[in-house]
Image: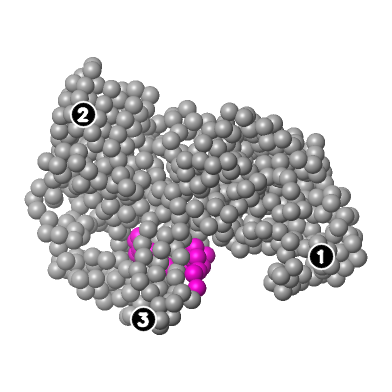
Amino acid sequence: MLLAPLGTDTLLEALHQELEALDVLQLAVLPNFEPGPVYEQALRAVVADVTILRPPEFAPFLSRFELADRLLLVDARAVPIGGWGFNRWLNGRHGDQPVRHLVQAVRPCGGSVERVEYDEGLRLRSVRRLYDGVTRLTVANVICSRLPVAAARCLSPDDTGSLPQVRFRLVQAGLPSLDVPQPGVVLDLTTPQGLLAANEAFLGGRGTTRRPPAFARYAADVLIGPGVRIPPSSRLYGPVVLHELAALEPGAVVVGPAVVGARARVGRESTVARSVIWPGTRVAPRAVVVGRVLVAAANAAGADGKDGDCANTPAAALIPNLNNGQNGRARRRQRFYRPIKRALDLLVSLPGLVLLAPLLMVVAALIKLTSRGPVLFGHEREGLNGRPFRCWKFRTMVHHAHRQQRELYAQNLVDGPQFKLAHDERITPLGHILRRTNIDELPQLFNVLRGEMSLIGPRPSPFRENQICVPWRQARLSVRPGITGLWQVCRRDRDAGDFHQWIYYDLLYVRHQSLWLDLRILLATALTLAGRWPVPLEWMIPRRRLATFESLMQAGVPGLADAPLTSQRRGRHGNADMSTVPAGPRRPAGLGPTSLTRPMLGGR
């Protein structure tokens, strides 16, 4: 895997570039197979002074160093999106703990399973949905470990092939250690899906905008290495990277994101799309290779979809922020949209807090004088990518009112996870005024200033409300929550409960988010006094785009938002873990925004 193509580099080159920033005395490779001379020569062509170790040679290798020297063990099969960040991890705010493990914890909005529990007679007892990182807490893998050479003396040669085993052995030896969670996504490059996802993430970001010295720019989104041959009749649709001495035969078509490794050859009139061609591999003439990692061993199979096939598990499903199905112009537009939106949040929230300071102080004084308890109420909500944060509001209820909510569930008047009472006696007289005027929401400008929220976005919700529907949760957590949004200005049926519209409008916003839509929502919020009466949806999003969105929902197409709406399926008898994530929210014929609740509640 160290020689796997990763954009314009190999995995070893990308790893070596990050290690160069550290004070590394010696770089060694411990393969989990018997390395031959060809393999050793290939590694030394990338890093001249690398040491290749067999397991019995590990202990003599350590004896060359002082006991206080530190050993950094890296599993090259687990690659974090955005790089390992060794400097940040080793020199961050983790104290002086000598033994540290960078672990891959499950992501807060990564996926979910349903656990079905049976009794001894195989009668169903309960079905519980567990979300990764919230109610399903595990350490999926160990990416790298740092420990003193003295501590490594307790490791046996059999331990060095598995970092989870290293972690277990150190704990067993009584050595205190610290687990540091790796933020973001970690890909397993031993799977075709993981390698495709890594290349898609690289090419979808800086891969074709950064040109290494050894590469030339053949087209806007196409980079080629030295000695690459491209006949005039071949066609390339970026982002595409062709490594040195790669060759295309006449009539070959390569559609990105795609990487063709060194000395690989794409046959006459063959098509390669969203794939990685391993170095030295030859694609047969007139073959069609789509969504695959093609290696020389699989070449004899042509394009039969067996060896290296990953068409059944899209690589985009492994990365939450890939712009699925977007062309280069759309990706560039999104790249500019996010920093502009963040700058707008700062330009509004900071002056807003300053200008509204007298009003905020008056409201705080009135709350303190009229009821017992704190001025502000902070409640934990889920933000971007499921990260929890404390959302602040002026307190409008009696102190500890939230503790009574479970006892009042039987009186709830609305559907879904929302909670509303006909006459909520917990609200104070001043709280009624603050809620009608939406002044209680003004402290959320502080959350906007901190980057936990945005001015425009889905309403910030706790995990209890987000757990109802898996695809909807993943979609709405792919953006920052907002003080106001599409649902707030377009919602109807407030008294009857509008959870169905809440889902529908949040998916619409995530799918169509743009600076122009944000400005429309901001203007509609001001003109309707924070949504006191509804604005027609067609004023926000053109009818043509709404019709496209409706057709996608009718067909059950995945990827209604930038976040993936799929998950892996697995299960077993008894206490079973079964997938609850559909390919996309299905919409029965004739379904409008007022009848979407039940399919979404079931997840399908």
> What residue did someone put label 2 on?
270
| Residue 509 drawn above or below residue 266 | below
> Crowding near pointer 3: few (<14 within 10 Å), some, many (20+)?
few
Q: Residue at x 84, y 54 (%)?
A: 434
Colouring chosen for the image of the structure: one colour
Any part of residue 598 in sight = yes
Amino acid type at circle 1 is Asp
**Element marked by disc 2:** loop
Q: Earlier in the sequence, mark 3 or mark 1?
A: 3
Q: Residue at x 50, y 65 (%)?
A: 129
Q: Residue at x 58, y 28 (%)?
A: 544
Amino acid type at circle 3 is Gly
Image location (x, y in percent) of residue 384:
56, 51
| Residue 5 drawn above or below residue 388 | above
Residue at the bottom extreme of this rendering: 120
Q: Earlier in the sequence, mark 3 or mark 2?
A: 3
> Would you say 146 lies left or right of 288 here?
right
Residue at the left extreme of this rendering: 37
Query: Which quadrant of the figure has residue 239?
Result: top left
